[in-house]
C-alpha cells in the first residue's frame, strides 16, 4: 500500500531549504526509497510549507528513515526551520488520475467496444490529432477519430490491451497492443482471415476534462507484412 508522509514546517530560509533538498537527492541516489515529492507554499503565509513525500509502502519509508543521509538531512532541516516540523503519516486508500480515467474510458469504450457516443464525451471539439502513419500527420477535429475507429474496427476483430501507462501533468502516455482477425477490407485489401497483432504508443494531452491533443506512433510495417501487403 502506498504510503505518504506530510512534513509541515515554517522557515524564513526557503532558498537554503531548497538547496538542502537538492543535496539530499544527490547524496541518497541509489539508496533512497522515496518515489515522489511535492513541496507546497502557503499562499496566505509565505514562510509556511508542506512537503508531500511518497513511498511504495510504510516499510519502504522506514528503510528510508534509517539511511544516514536521511538522518543528516533531518537535523539540517530542523536547523533551518522556525520551530520543530510536524509529520503526518498516511496510508493511501484512494489514488486516481482523472486524466488517466478519461483516456482509459476512451480506449475501452470507443476503441475496444466501438461506442461512438464517447467521441463527444471524451474529445474536445477542436481536438488536434498527430498520426505518424498518415500522409497528413496533423488534423484538427474529433471527426478524424471517428473515421479511424470505423476503419480499424471494420478491418479487424481486435482485442485491445493497455500494457502500461504513465501520467504526468496534463499528459497520459499509453503503451498498447492489439490482436485480431483481419475480417474486412482495410486500406484497400480484402479480408485475409489472418490473425494480426500491432503495438504502439499514444500520448494524449488533456484539458478541461477532455482529450485535447494526441500523438500516435505504431508499427505499421509489421502489420502490413502480416497481412501480406509487403514482401
Image (spheres, helix red, strand yellow):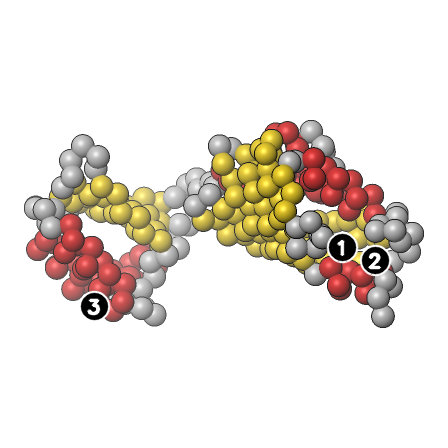
Q: Residues within 10 Å of mark 2 (few under 14, many from 20)?
A: some
Identity of the residue drawn at 80% across and 58% down:
196
Q: Residues within 10 Å of mark 1 (few under 14, many from 20)?
A: some
Asked whether 153 or 76 is in front, the reply is: 153
Tell which circle, 2 or 3, labels the residue nearer the N-terminal end: 3
Q: Secondary structure at mark 3?
A: helix
Disc 1 versus disc 3: nearer the observer = 1
Q: Secondary structure at mark 2?
A: strand
Residue on which the image places disc 1? 179
Q: Residues within 10 Å of mark 3 (few under 14, many from 20)?
A: few
- Whether residue 25 is visible, yes or no, is yes
Tell which circle, 2 or 1, labels the residue nearer the N-terminal end: 1
Q: Indicate the position of residue 122 as horizontal and vertical percent values.
A: 60, 34
Residue on which the image places disc 2? 195
Q: Secondary structure at mark 1?
A: strand
Q: Indicate the position of residue 19 as horizontal and vertical percent values.
A: 19, 59
Spatial separation of the CA atoms under disc 1 and disc 3 = 50 Å
Identity of the residue drawn at 59% across and 37% down:
127
Q: Is residue 130 left or right of residue 35?
A: right
- Judge whether 172 appears above or below 197 on screen: above
Identity of the residue drawn at 27% across and 67% down:
26
Q: Indicate the position of residue 132 as horizontal and vertical percent values.
A: 66, 55
The reply to whether discs 1 and 3 touch (Cβ–Cβ < 8 Å) is no
Q: Indicate the position of residue 111 as horizontal and vertical percent values.
A: 70, 42
Identity of the residue drawn at 37% across and 57% down:
35
Residue on which the image places disc 3? 68
The C terminus is located in which quarter?
bottom right
Spatial separation of the CA atoms under disc 2 and disc 3 = 56 Å
- Judge whether 181 appears above or below 125 on screen: below
Amino acid at each position: 500500500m502506498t504510503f505518504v508522509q506530510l512534513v509541515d514546517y515554517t522557515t524564513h530560509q526557503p532558498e537554503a531549504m531548497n538547496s538542502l533538498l537538492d543535496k539530499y537527492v544527490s547524496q541518497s541516489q541509489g539508496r533512497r526509497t522515496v518515489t515522489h515529492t511535492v513541496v507546497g507554499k502557503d499562499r496566505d503565509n509565505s514562510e509556511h510549507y508542506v512537503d508531500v513525500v511518497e513511498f511504495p509502502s510504510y516499510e519502504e519509508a522506514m528503510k528510508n528513515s534509517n539511511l544516514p543521509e536521511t538522518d543528516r538531512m533531518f537535523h539540517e532541516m530542523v536547523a533551518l526551520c522556525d520551530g520543530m516540523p510536524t509529520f503526518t503519516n498516511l496510508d493511501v486508500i484512494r489514488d486516481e488520475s482523472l486524466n488517466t480515467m478519461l483516456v482509459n474510458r476512451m480506449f475501452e469504450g470507443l476503441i475496444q467496444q466501438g461506442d461512438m457516443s464517447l467521441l463527444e464525451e471524451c474529445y474536445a471539439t477542436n481536438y488536434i490529432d498527430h498520426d505518424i502513419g498518415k500522409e497528413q500527420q496533423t488534423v484538427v477535429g474529433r471527426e478524424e477519430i471517428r473515421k479511424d475507429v470505423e476503419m480499424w474496427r471494420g478491418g479487424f476483430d481486435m482485442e485491445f490491451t493497455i500494457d502500461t501507462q504513465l501520467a504526468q501533468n496534463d499528459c497520459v502516455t499509453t503503451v498498447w497492443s492489439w490482436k485480431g482477425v483481419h475480417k474486412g477490407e482495410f486500406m484497400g485489401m480484402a479480408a485475409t482471415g489472418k490473425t494480426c497483432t500491432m503495438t504502439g504508443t499514444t500520448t494524449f494531452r488533456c484539458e478541461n476534462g477532455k482529450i485535447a491533443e494526441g500523438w500516435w506512433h505504431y508499427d505499421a510495417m509489421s502489420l502490413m507484412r502480416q497481412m501480406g501487403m509487403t514482401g
